[in-house]
Amino acid sequence: MLRNVSYPSPTNHLHLSLIPIKIALKSRNRTLHTSMSNEQTAVLEANQAFYRAFEKKDIDAMEAVCSKGIGSLCIHPGRKTIKGWDAIRQSWLQIFKATRYLEIDLDVVSVEVSGDMAYVVLVENVMQVAGNRRVEAKSMATNAFERMGGSWYLIHHHGSPIVG
């Protein structure tokens, strides 16, 4: 279950429940809410939808937030670049098939928007049960989004393992 996410604020990191992000942002730290633009909030909502789909192993939900373009890229931690939605989709299906259970906590480092392009830099804290093994891992991730038809779509996901 996606449990916690922290967003950058001028003074500290604030942990917020991910469900739903709009309500959490409105009901918590007012400074945080006013320091984030509507565009940044929309990008974070798309990012949230991606991780909710990841955690629930829901390829249809993931497909709804990911660009289907041939230029889409995905780099899983420690793996080579995968290009194009069809190959990316297959990689997620393999991960979902091998995984019995997932929990993901996020620590958002930065959210930047420039025109129709945006990115989120974050730390993924993943607990995964695969077979009879429970694995906990941290990855530094960058998710790039492009606004198309008024909605934000993930065009690039890159996770790098944090060692130590």
Image (cartoon, rainbow, N blue to C red):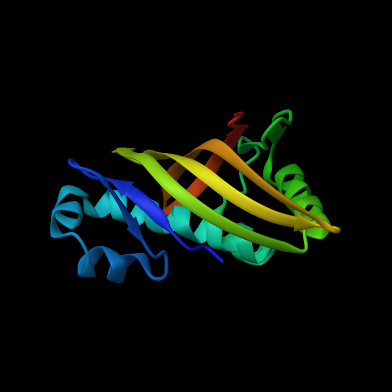
- Extreme-right residue of the structure: 131
Q: Which residue is at 85% across, 59% downward?
A: 132
In the displayed structure, does residue 86 sit left or right of residue 30? right
**Whether residue 16 is situated above or below residue 109 in the rendered picture:** below
Q: Looking at the rendering, which quadrant does residue 112 occupy?
A: top left
Q: Which residue is at 22% across, 65% downward?
A: 28
Q: Which residue is at 21% across, 49% downward?
A: 36
Q: Measured from the top left, where is residue 115 in percent x and y? A: 30, 38
- Extreme-front residue of the structure: 164
Residue 149: in sight, yes or no?
A: no
Picture quarter with the N terminus: bottom right
Q: Measured from the top left, where is residue 33 in percent x and y? A: 19, 57
Q: Measured from the top left, where is residue 99 in percent x and y? A: 77, 58
* Residue in the foreground of this view, choosing between 123 and 35: 123
* Residue in the foreground of this view, choosing between 101 and 25: 101
* Residue in the foreground of this view, choosing between 94 and 88: 94
Q: Looking at the rendering, which quadrant does residue 20 occupy?
A: bottom left
In the displayed structure, does residue 157 sit left or right of residue 92? left
**Number of on-image labels:** 0
Q: Which residue is at 64% across, 66% downward?
A: 56
Residue 75: in sight, yes or no?
A: yes
Picture quarter with the C terminus: top right
Q: Measured from the top left, where is residue 25 in percent x and y? A: 26, 63
